[in-house]
Amino acid sequence: MASASAAGACSREEASAVAAAAAAPTGALPVFAAAAPCAFSPGGRRLVALSGPDGRLRVWETGSSRLHHEYVPSAHLSAACTCLAWAPPGAGGGGRPSPSKEGPQRKKRKSEAAEAGEQLDLLAIGTAVGSILLYSTIRGELQSKLSGHDRKINCVRWHQDNGCLYSCSDDKHIVEWNTQTCKVKCKWKGDNSSVSSLCISPDGKMLLSAGRSIKLWDLETKEVYRHFTGHATAVSTLMFVTVRPPNENQPFDGITGLYFLSGAVHDRLLNVWQVRSDRKERNAVMSFMATDEPIHIDLTMSESKEEPVKLAVVCRDGQLHLFEQVLNGSCKKPLTSKCTIQVATSGEGSDTTPKPIPILAAAFCSDKESLLLMYGNSLQPVIERVPVNTTESHMCLVRDIQKTLMLKTEMAVTKVKTPIINSEVKTLMPGLPGHSAAIKPSFRGEKMETKRKSTAAGREESIEDRLGAMDIDVMKMKQSTGGLPQTDNFAVLLVQGLESSDPEILNKVLQTKKEAIIKKTVARMPVYSVIPLLHELTKRLQGHPYSASQMVRWLKAVLTIHASYLSTLPDLVPQLGMLYQLMESRVKTLQKLSRLHGKLYLIVTQVAALEQTQDVPDVNQTAKLVYEEESSEEGSDDEMAGENDSDENWDEEDEKEESDENDERDELSGDEQEMAIEKEINGESDLDPENESEEE
């Protein structure tokens, strides 16, 4: 057993770092698993029973953290363990069911009588199918099976005097069992909904049951004695806190004035109730506030008025809270813890950040001044005894689980024996047809040679020579072992990485860029791994853009190859809701990004073109030789240009020319008249055409 003084408590800064790490998002650190059924043995807390996620029941020794017993129920996969309860010492029912009266009576042996007197070994196991198993840790076998419920068993409790067993289930009933005959002694309806928790009063005459409301039953009449308000959710814990009432002057009937504690699912408040003579008072008198939902509770009962009640509460976030309070009245404000205990790694080596280690359960020792802490993994927990010190508000224990487990493994004694084989025997190796290897005989007293074998000449044999001696083709092995793993290996690695959540394996597989390998890997993976792969891809799509672009290839392959399987899932939309939202948010900005890309492309091209023009040197553009050609067209063009420029002058000249022509015509007409008169006088006639022509 590790000592609390072996590794000191961490500093305030480390404690705050561990607290911040425990409250970190899911992707940063592994989330602590749900509470596993756990029960410490009564009395000296020598043993602790724990049912792991694999359905196996393991009994550990608290002093050495060694495995005492391991029991695998026949239906451990279909009928998982839901609750555990140790039988109190001397409760009865430790032996086998009594034989019938017709059979012969034989005297019990001393060993059997001792086992019957020590009822520490008997363990009641409630299952999810409605049956109860009674397991004997001394014999290491199943003693009997109780069948009387139809649905899941929520709680089992032993009576401390008569050895009877009480159980409650989702079928709304409470059953009282006779463990000697393994038959139902009494069965009655406990609530209108499922009954989730039970607790027997210290005098053994009353029974507390709870679904959402809490009821106090009289075990003789099976009638309700008191009603209490309860919680908004299903009650998961019921425990009596006091043995005697605070007011010792009044007569005590065994139940009135006692306090009891209750906790519920998804509720971080633990309520304290008092059984009063007034039936109208049904509310809690005080409450304790934790940081998360309680998964395991242990307390020291108060036997006097001045003695405070000590409460150890293990929460789902892996922390332990210690409360200490004297119950002498009501308190409206919730009470906070006196001390909080955490377990964390040292943060040395490759990872410098201390990581929290979850506390699975805790129990007070018989001296009430120390605690038994069980932390780590439920399959291989570490149990340590820690002194209780409520003067410090926060304690952080630095532990190295890997080193502790390695020490335990080295201390374990192996029971494997090497068989002695004759020299004439040949062993056929699996997977290689026709291959046989002769095994040399091993004689006792000879020491095993650890050095490599050498040849007669003193030269060490190479690996190739040894493989040749074993008649194995070396070239085939080199060809088969070289290069990257094949596609079927990728599919196996991918499934293993998804099941174990190993980031190294997932990174090796998902960083593949070849489309053909991606498609073949997705096609060969089983369908039950499709949804976990989509969740992993969704988580990686939210990371670095380079990783997101790589994950898109895998996402495309999964959606195209396994589309028929995904369409058959009824809850596909809620499972892939995060992926839908992520894709919609990315697509919304695509149009704006494309517009911005176009504008930036134009600007960049213009800037690049301008830089190119500036870089080109200036060229001398003056002509070395000029040739001019004269033509009539150039003269006419000049004349036309002159005409266009002086349109008004041209008009004035036209008018002058017209007036001159008219004057000339008038002058000509006057001369012609004078000549005609002279001709008439001279007797010349114009009627003769011949004369006209001659004159002309």
Image (spheres, helix red, strand yellow):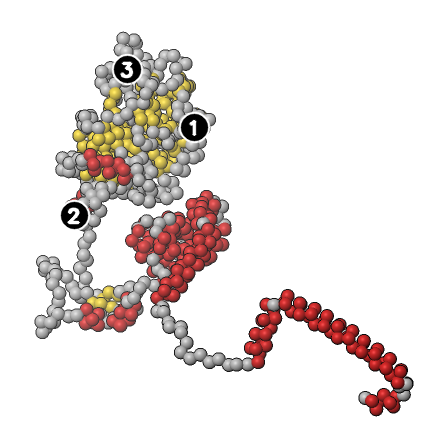
Is 91 located above or below residue 347 in the figure? above
In this view, the mark in front (2 or 3): 3
Q: Looking at the image, which residue is at 30% across and 29% down?
A: 290
Q: Label 1's element?
A: strand
Looking at the image, is mark 3 or mark 1 earlier in the sequence? Answer: 1
Q: Which amino acid is tagged 1?
A: His
Is 35 located above or below residue 497 in the figure? above
Residues at marks 2 and 3, CA–CA distance in whole angstroms: 52 Å
Is 304 located above or below residue 554 in the figure? above
Residues at marks 3 and 1, CA–CA distance in whole angstroms: 35 Å
The answer to which image quadrant residue 462 occupies is bottom left
- The reply to whether the C-beta atoms of the residues labelled 2 and 1 are less than 8 Å apart is no
Left or right of 29 on screen, residue 524: right
In this view, the mark in front (2 or 1): 2
Q: Which mark is residue 284?
A: none
In this view, the mark in front (3 or 1): 3
Looking at the image, is mark 2 or mark 1 earlier in the sequence? Answer: 1
Q: Looking at the image, which residue is at 57% across and 77% down?
A: 635
The answer to which image quadrant residue 254 occupies is top left
Q: Which mark is residue 328?
A: 3
The residue where tag 1 is placed is 173
Q: Which mark is residue 410?
A: 2
Residues at marks 2 and 1, CA–CA distance in whole angstroms: 49 Å
